[in-house]
Amino acid sequence: MHVRMLTGGLAAALVALSLTGGQAAAAAPGPADTTLAARVLTYDAAGAAEFRSAVDRGAAIWNASVDAVELRPVTAGQRANIRVLADNGWPRALPTTLGNGTVYIGRQAVDQGYDTVRISSHELGHILGLPDRKPGPCSSLMSGSSAGVSCTNPYPNAAEKTEVEDNFGGVLAGRTPAVRAELIVD
């Protein structure tokens, strides 16, 4: 006799019938674990200069706003998904792939009066897959500078949160497929 490892309900049913001499043995299914595990993205704000606390605050806002992704500061020896740099230009994000890229916190916008935490949160939104939505109201984080310098809202709206959740999809945490055996008689 061979035993082959499979996953799936049909294989389990075949094993149950084989082991019970053809009599059906029913087991109550256990509760499904539907806890979503966040995809962890690390960021390196060492080059963010005077904007480092604004970057940390922007990351914390995203962490409080969505479940499918979590932004964490990089630890020593770890490669960051996101690099954050300060420069004298306009703020921008250069995503390479979803969840990866470089954010520039440009001093030009800060010098014009734009809020540093809103800038950070907005640019991190690009790395999380969100496009600019200009012109737009202050209630839309991704409206960016089109909301004006008086807008200091650093929070994504419901549609922006949903889009990030959809982009990262989430994975089931703590759940591995059950291994079942299929009995094959040679």
Image (tube, helix red, strand yellow):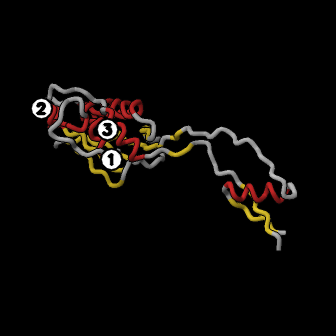
Ranked by sequence position, the earlier of labels 2 and 1 is 2
Say which residue appears at 17% left-offset and 42% top-offset.
90
The reply to whether dot 3 and dot 2 touch (C-beta < 8 Å) is no
Q: Taking 62 as reference, is 25 above or below it?
A: below
The reply to whether dot 1 and dot 3 touch (C-beta < 8 Å) is no
Say which residue appears at 47% left-offset and 41% top-offset.
75
* The C terminus: image quadrant: bottom right
Structural distance between the alpha carbons of marks 3 and 2? 26 Å
> Which residue corresponds to mark 3?
160
Q: Taking 6 as reference, is 28 above or below it?
A: above
Question: Of the residues shown, which amino acid type is indicated by label 3?
Answer: Glu
Question: Of the residues shown, which amino acid type is indicated by label 2?
Answer: Gln
> Which residue corresponds to mark 2?
112
**Marks 2, 1: nearer the viewer:** 1
| Other residues around mark 1 within 10 Å, as few (<14) / some (14–19) / many (≥20) | some
Q: Nearer the viewer, residue 67 or 7?
A: 7
Answer with the quarter of the image where residue 115 lies. top left
Say which residue appears at 12% left-offset and 32% top-offset.
112
Labels in figure, total = 3
How far from the left and from the top, in percent, is residue 14? 76, 59
Residue extending furthest toward the front: 23
Q: Nearer the viewer, residue 122 or 109?
A: 122
Which mark identifies residue 129?
1
Residue 76 visible in rendering: no
Q: Nearer the viewer, residue 105 or 60?
A: 60
Query: Mark 2: which secondary structure?
Result: loop
How far from the left and from the top, in percent, is residue 26? 77, 46
Answer with the quarter of the image where residue 92 lies. top left
| Other residues around mark 3 within 10 Å, as few (<14) / some (14–19) / many (≥20) | many
| Other residues around mark 2 within 10 Å, as few (<14) / some (14–19) / many (≥20) | few
Residue extending furthest toward the right: 21
